Amino acid sequence: MPKGKQIKASEPTLKRLPIYLHYLQKVVKKGVLNISAPYVARDLKYDPTQVVKDLSVTGIKGKPRVGYNTYELVKSIEEFLDFNKRNEAFLFGAGNLGSALISYPALESFGIKIIAAFDINEKKVGEKIGDINVLNTNMFQELAEKLNIKIGILTTPAEAAQETAELMAAGGITGIWNLTPVSLKLPEGVVIQNTSMYSNVAVLLRKMKESNNK
Amino acid sequence: MPKGKQIKASEPTLKRLPIYLHYLQKVVKKGVLNISAPYVARDLKYDPTQVVKDLSVTGIKGKPRVGYNTYELVKSIEEFLDFNKRNEAFLFGAGNLGSALISYPALESFGIKIIAAFDINEKKVGEKIGDINVLNTNMFQELAEKLNIKIGILTTPAEAAQETAELMAAGGITGIWNLTPVSLKLPEGVVIQNTSMYSNVAVLLRKMKESNNK
DNA sequence: TAGATTGTTAATCGATTAACAATC
DNA sequence: TAGATTGTTAATCGATTAACAATC
C-alpha cells in the first residue's frame, strides 16, 4: 500500500474540517456555485487566512477573486476525512446518548455507519432503534469475527466503560470513540478518541463570567 | 463586585479541568487521601508538568514529596469552575441527545442544573424526563421572565437551531451551549459555546489511518 | 538527611495571524 | 486593466515541555 501524499493536518484543523463540511453542504443545497475563504470566515467566525490554510490541506484548488467551487470543496473535504467511505462501527451502550447517535442522520454524512448496537440491559436487547438492532453484548465476540468491524463507539454508563472497552479491544476493535468521562486503559495499538462534552460546560461558564466582569 | 484574583486559565487547561475532576472524584471515593501530579499524569496520559500547571490555576497548594490532598483538590477545581454553584439552565429540544443530557446524573456534578426542557413536538410536551418537565416552547418567554435563567442548552435538530437560539436570546439567555452543528448568528453579548461531537470522528479516523500506515 | 515532588522561570514547539507575491 | 482572493512564506503568539531551585 503506497503512503501517497498523506498531507498532515494539525488536530485543530482536523476538528474544524467537519464544521466547514456541514456549513458547505448547506451552501451547496442553496445552489451557490462558488464561495471564497473570507466569506466562509465571516459566517463561521474564523480568520480568513486560517480558512485558506485549513481548506488547502484537502488538496482543493481555488481561483483568485472567485474562490472555490462549492461542490468540489465538499467532495475534497469528504475525501480527505474519509467521510465518503462507509466506515462501519459498532455502538456499545444503547442508552439515551447511544440512541441519539444512532438516530442522528448526520452521523452518516460524517463517515460513520453504525451496523449494530450492543447492550446488557435485557429490556433493550431485541429493540430496534431506527433500523439498528440492539443485541446482547455477549453476542459481540461472534459478530466481531464475522464482520471485521474496526470502530467502536462507547456510550455506556461510566461504571461499565473500562470493562466494555476491554471487550471491544479483545474483539478486534482498533479505534474507540469514547464518549464516557472515563480514562480508558488499553493495550497499545488501540486508538482512543475521548470526547468529553462536559469540558465545554467549563468553558461556557468561564466565558460567561468573563463577559460579566467587563 | 470586586474582580478579585481572577486567575486566567487557558482554554486547553479549562477543558482538562473537568477531566481531572471526574478522575479525582473517583479517587476520593476510593479513600485515597493524597495524590501527586506524576501519578495523575500516568493515569490520564498527560505530561506531569502540565498537571502541576493546570492544577495550580485553581489555587491549590501541594506538598513536595506528598502531592495534593485529594479532597481539597476536588473542592478547589469545583470552586474554580463554578461547579459547586447551581448554575440553572433551560434545555431546548427534548430529543435523544437532550434526554441524554437531562438523564445523565454527572451533569449536575459539572455545575449545570436543568430546570425545564422545551420542545415544539406536541407528543413530547407534557412528558417527564427524570423529574424534568417538557414544556411547550411557547411557554419559554413567560418562564424566562419569572425565573431569570441565563444558560440555555441547544439540542434541537439543526433546522430549528438558529430560530430557537434567537428565541433564547430574546428571552434573556446570555450563554448558549450549542450542541447542534449550526454556526449561530446572534447579537453581541450572548456567549456561544459550540460543541461539535463530530469533529472527534474526523480525528479518530485520521489517527486510525496513521497508525495503520506505520 | 536524601530524594521525590512542587512551583516557577526559561526554552521549545506548534498553531495562528500577518505580509505579500502570484493570478484570475 | 484593476483589484480581490489564493497560496505561501515569515512573524507572532500562546501552549507545552524542560530545567531547576525550593521544600517537605
Image (cartoon, coloured by chain):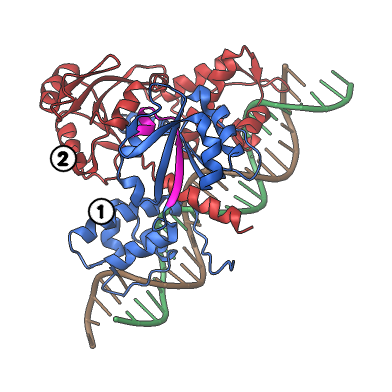
Chain colours: A blue, B red, C green, D brown
The answer to whether residue B8 is visible is no
Tell me: residue D18, above or below residue B104. Answer: below
Q: As displayed, is residue A71 above or below residue B85?
A: below
- Return the x and y of residue B176 as percentages of the image width and height: 27, 33
Binning the other alpha carbons within 10 Å of mark 2 as few (below 14), some (14 to 19) or many (20 upward) gives few
Is circle 1 on the same chain as circle 2? no
Magenta segment range?
A87-99
Q: Point out residue A105 in the picture as x, y percentages from the top left corner.
A: 30, 44
Camera-side residue of B130 and A140: A140
Residue at numbered disc 1: A43
**Rendered residue at 23%/39% (across/down):** B157
Work out whether residue B119 can be spotted: yes
Depicted D24 relative to depicted A193: above or below? above
Q: Quadrant of the C terminus of chain A?
A: top left
Q: Is A6 placed left or right of A54 in the picture?
A: right
Seen at 38% across and 21% down, the residue is: A123
Q: Is residue B116 left or right of residue B195?
A: left
Residue B135 place in picture, x, y as percent: 16, 22
Tell me which residue sits at (35%, 64%) in the image: A75
Instruction: Report the disc number at residue A196.
Output: none
Kindly identify the residue that appears in the image at 54 percent across and 30 percent down.
Answer: A164
**Magenta residue check for B202:** no
Amino acid of disc 2: Glu
A77 up-or-down from B113: above or below: below
Which residue is labeled 2 in the image? B163
Single out the mark in the foreground, 1 or 2: 2
Is residue A89 highlighted in magenta?
yes
Q: Mark 1 belongs to which amino acid?
A: Asp
> At numbered mark 1, what does the secondary structure look like: helix, strand or loop?
helix
Q: Which chain is home to disc 1?
A: A
- Circle 2: element type: helix
